Image: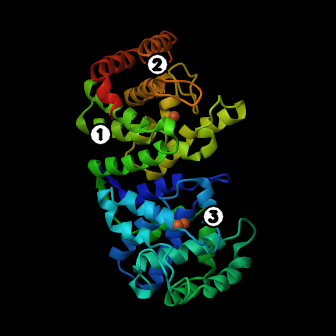
């Protein structure tokens, strides 16, 4: 089994773009602008590939929504924290290591000074291109006809040449910006297809081990959003993989279960930070925001196109066999063994953990709750029995994950 890295990064970039305004497509647009500049320059596939990968994750180091808002300003006094963190995170994933330095330098000013110590031509070319593309994106209007704004956007970009942005790239961009279609591609609903067309030539296939590494990186972003969920996704992944192998899943599917566990709460990046640590029960309105997260998990993973079962296994973890779950209100016949496994593992791990409004529950309380769920036909009895066996055996080892 292997996965198209480009499509996967393209899809996962969406979860880096949640804000109070919903799902943005900042990373996708920056990738599109970057490739448009690269094509105007006639750059080869190697550098286009690196540029594409770096652009789709360039702001991965942003910790909070507030930080993202600040980066929306045209000139940011101190953007370096997310550059450093992004670089550190990307160094942990084998196939993304080559883009770490580019991400570190994606706000480097042409004339310096920069934390990298680099200026001018010494700043890596992909970083210079992404910096320009990133600034173009923050200048795009929220609504109205983009073509009315393009002259003003180009003028502002030109005003940064030589001080903030590379002068020769600003010239290239000015030529790209002459095409109406460039601006319309950015704001119309055809961006995905346009990028698919431009992305021909960018082909990296990931094996399952690399997919797991990438999933672990995103699991870390999800879990670190709240001290209460610290390592939650890792634990669900480890438990689901162990249960899957005892259910007789072949090794590839066990690995996929692990990836599903790592990514099941991907959509939680859509929940405002203040709610994740709220030291009280959520209001009904706030609880509805939580209910959105598996919906986003599903559709973000669907955008990746493959592995085919991943969206279901990851996103159906709040569905229940009796149709009382959310957000799709599926019933048992639509929930296969993989989806049932991730659902039970998620419940078990969540109940063990402290939450802002309650401490972790005891083993007997969890067993009583799960038995009740099996009696009510909400959770799968065989999977629950296996989860209880595995956790009884692994106990401390699982908590140490
Ligand atoms: Fe940035
Ligand atoms: Fe950015
Ligand atoms: Fe969840």
Q: Which-is-in-front pick, marks 2 and 3?
A: 3
Say which residue appears at 50% left-offset and 39% top-offset.
227
Query: Of the numbered discs in the image, which one, if any, rests on residue 70?
Result: 3
Residue 323 place in picture, x, y as percent = 56, 22
Q: Is mark 2 within 8 Å of ligand 3?
A: no
Left or right relative to 87: residue 108: right
Which residue position holds label 2?
Answer: 379
Which residue is more in the foreground, 148 or 284? 284
Cα–Cα span, label 1 and label 3: 39 Å
**Mark 2 to mark 3: distance in Å?**
44 Å
Give the x, y percent position of residue 135.
59, 74
User: Does residue 246 lie above or below 96 as drawn?
Assistant: above
Question: Could you tell which of marks 2 and 1 lies nearer the N-terminus?
Answer: 1
Give neighbour class at mark 1: few <14, some 14-19, many 20+ (Cα, 10 Å).
many
Image spot of residue 252 (x, y percent): 26, 40
Depth check, front residue: 158 or 319: 158
Ligand 1 closer than 8 Å to the CB at disc 3?
Answer: no
The quadrant where residue 342 appears: top left
Residue 24: x and y in percent read 60, 57
- Count of marks placed on residues: 3
Asked if 393 appears above or below 276 in the picture, the reply is: above
The residue drawn where x is 48% and y is 54% is 11
State which quadrant residue 54 falls in. Answer: bottom left
Residue 255's disc is 1
Image-quadrant location for residue 240: top left
């Amino acid at each position: 089994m292997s996965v198209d890295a480009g499509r996967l990064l393209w899809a996962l970039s969406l979860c880096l773009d949640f804000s109070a305004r919903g799902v943005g497509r900042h990373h996708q647009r920056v990738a599109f602008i970057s490739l448009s500049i690269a094509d105007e320059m006639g750059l080869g596939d190697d550098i286009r590939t690196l540029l594409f990968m770096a652009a789709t994750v360039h702001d991965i180091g942003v910790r909070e929504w507030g930080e993202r808002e600040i980066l929306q300003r045209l000139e940011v006094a101190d953007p370096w924290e997310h550059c450093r963190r992004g670089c550190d995170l990307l160094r942990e994933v084998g196939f993304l290591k080559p883009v770490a330095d580019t991400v570190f330098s994606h706000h480097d000013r042409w004339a310096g000074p920069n934390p990298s110590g680099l200026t001018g031509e010494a700043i890596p070319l992909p970083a210079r291109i992404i910096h320009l593309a990133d600034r173009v994106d923050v200048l795009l209007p929220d609504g109205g006809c983009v073509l009315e704004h393009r002259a003003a956007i180009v003028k502002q970009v030109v005003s940064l040449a030589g001080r903030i942005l590379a002068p020769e790239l600003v010239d290239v961009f000015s030529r790209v910006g002459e095409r109406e279609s460039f601006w319309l591609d950015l704001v119309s609903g055809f961006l995905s297809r346009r990028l698919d067309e431009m992305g021909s030539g960018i082909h990296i296939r990931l094996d399952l081990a690399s997919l797991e590494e990438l999933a672990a990186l995103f699991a870390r972003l999800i879990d670190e959003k709240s001290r209460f969920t610290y390592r939650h996704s890792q634990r669900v992944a480890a438990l689901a993989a162990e249960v899957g192998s005892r259910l007789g899943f072949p090794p590839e599917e066990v690995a996929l279960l692990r990836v599903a566990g790592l990514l099941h709460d991907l959509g939680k990046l859509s929940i405002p930070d203040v709610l994740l640590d709220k030291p009280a029960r959520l209001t009904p309105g706030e609880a509805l925001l939580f209910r959105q997260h598996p919906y986003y998990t599903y559709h973000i993973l669907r955008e990746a196109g493959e592995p085919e079962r991943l969206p279901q296994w990851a996103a159906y973890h709040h569905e229940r066999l009796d149709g009382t779950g959310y957000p799709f209100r599926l019933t048992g016949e639509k929930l296969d063994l993989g989806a049932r496994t991730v659902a039970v593992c998620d419940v078990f791990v969540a109940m063990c953990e402290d939450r802002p409004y309650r401490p972790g529950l005891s083993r007997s309380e969890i067993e009583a709750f799960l038995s009740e769920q099996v009696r009510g036909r909400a959770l799968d009895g065989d999977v629950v029995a296996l989860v209880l066996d595995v956790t009884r055996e692994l106990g401390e080892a699982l908590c140490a994950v």
